[in-house]
Image: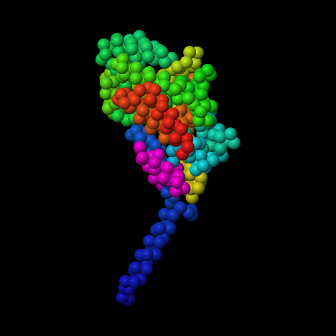
Amino acid sequence: MKNNPWIAIVIACFAMIIAGCSNSASGDGDSTTLTFYSTATTEEDKAVIKEAITTFEEENPNIDIEGNFPGDGYEQMLRVKMAANDMPDLFDTHGWAKARYGEYVADLSDMDWVKNLDPALNEILKNDQGKVYAFPLNQAKDGITYNANLLKKYGIEPPTTFDEFMDALYQIKEKSDGKVTPLWFHGSDKSAFGQYFDQFSTPLLITDEQHNYEKELLDGTFDWSHYTFLPEKLKQMQEDGLLNEDALTAQIQQQAQLMAQGKIGFTFGGGSIGPAVEELNPEVQVGVVPMPAIHEGDKPSWIGGERHTVAAWKDSENLEEAKKFIAFLAQPEIAKKIAEGTSLPAGLANVEADNYYSEYYKKFKDIKVYPYFDRVYLPSGMWDVMGSTGQELLSGSMTPEEVSEKMSKEYTRLRKQ
């Protein structure tokens, strides 16, 4: 019988329809694709998360995870998706689980891992009604990183107060004959100065009972002259030669190299600098110390809380599969691998990660962790202001008092939005 070309076309179209159905998100044996957005930026962090995704997909061949790592574009991308109420199935709340993303995330309180959530994260990832907003891949404990070999060589104890911190900077300058930068900034990125202001704002304005402005910061009545101490000290550091001369143009890629060469005393380096330095020069030990107390009688503090998390969109058509991935991430062996791969403590109390800074986290295990200052007390958008005012201060276009005035104006303006 002669072949009919129309029959062949119908058969081909029918096959395409069947194939399309096999890739849909419904029915046994069908394939589901989950979208996942992460704020991870370093190659080490992205690699360990991608490895976890691959392992999950191998164990669950009917679920594919489309990983996205937008870097600096993450926040704007998620804002657009929130406005359209079209969120990814899974996404990183990067410190804003409750305040920014709270109405978009599914409640994870019924999941098995919740009973092992580190109590230090309760305030950040749970509300008073018991809702759990996200699963923590790791948790931040930010302080000040330093060259431990250098401090030992010069007989300098890691500082516990701001005065001791300043004294250590002066000693490094003097004892190295100016060959070592006491405090190094990668100021081509304004976030380097944002980190200084944000981390020191907590001991300046929150942790000491006699200087606690929490209420005023939250209700909008805060007097920003109390903030001037921080830009004054930063300007003093610059004028006294305690900062790198290229503090406004240096790039973060230089940080690990200079630390490995013994040319940096202190820096705000985060979790990844230690392993990066070790790879370049195993002889150099990078230490970390909690944020020094500013007021007499106060105690040091860790700054942090959630670093990388995974939340599920409450309106996702694939919520069951999304929670299945979160349950996979919460398995102790997986949680341990991710925490170690990111050089940070795990977010679960039943997981002990052996990472680069473990000895320091154990040494300071009783130090309280406070959430990032801007995430609790400042309106969205103030992080950029903190960073840019630092750049303007060191460039000479602003005085310390003008920095506080700019913070006050932007704080008031952004609260109204």
Percent across and percent down for residue 230 are 47, 24
Percent across and percent down for residue 199 are 49, 28
Residue lying furthest bottom in this view? 1
Q: Quadrant of the N terminus?
A: bottom left
* The image quarter in which residue 250 lies: top left
**Magenta-drawn stretch contains 86:** yes
- At a point 46% along the width and 68% down the height, the residue shown is 19
Percent across and percent down for residue 208 are 59, 22
- At a point 41% along the width and 35% down the height, the residue shown is 388
Q: Quadrant of the C terminus?
A: top right
Task: Specify whether residue 103 is in view.
Answer: yes
- At a point 40% along the width and 79% down the height, the residue shown is 9
Query: In terms of depth relative to the viewer, which is nearer, 251 or 328?
Result: 251
* The image quarter in which residue 266 lies: top left
**Side of 202 where 281 appears, left or right:** left
**Magenta-drawn stretch contains 213:** no
Magenta stretch: give its range. Answer: 62-90
**Side of 381 where 277 appears, left or right:** left
**Side of 93 where 192 appears, left or right:** left
Task: Specify whether residue 97 is in view.
Answer: no
Query: In terms of depth relative to the viewer, which is nearer, 49 or 295?
Result: 295
Percent across and percent down for residue 403 are 45, 30
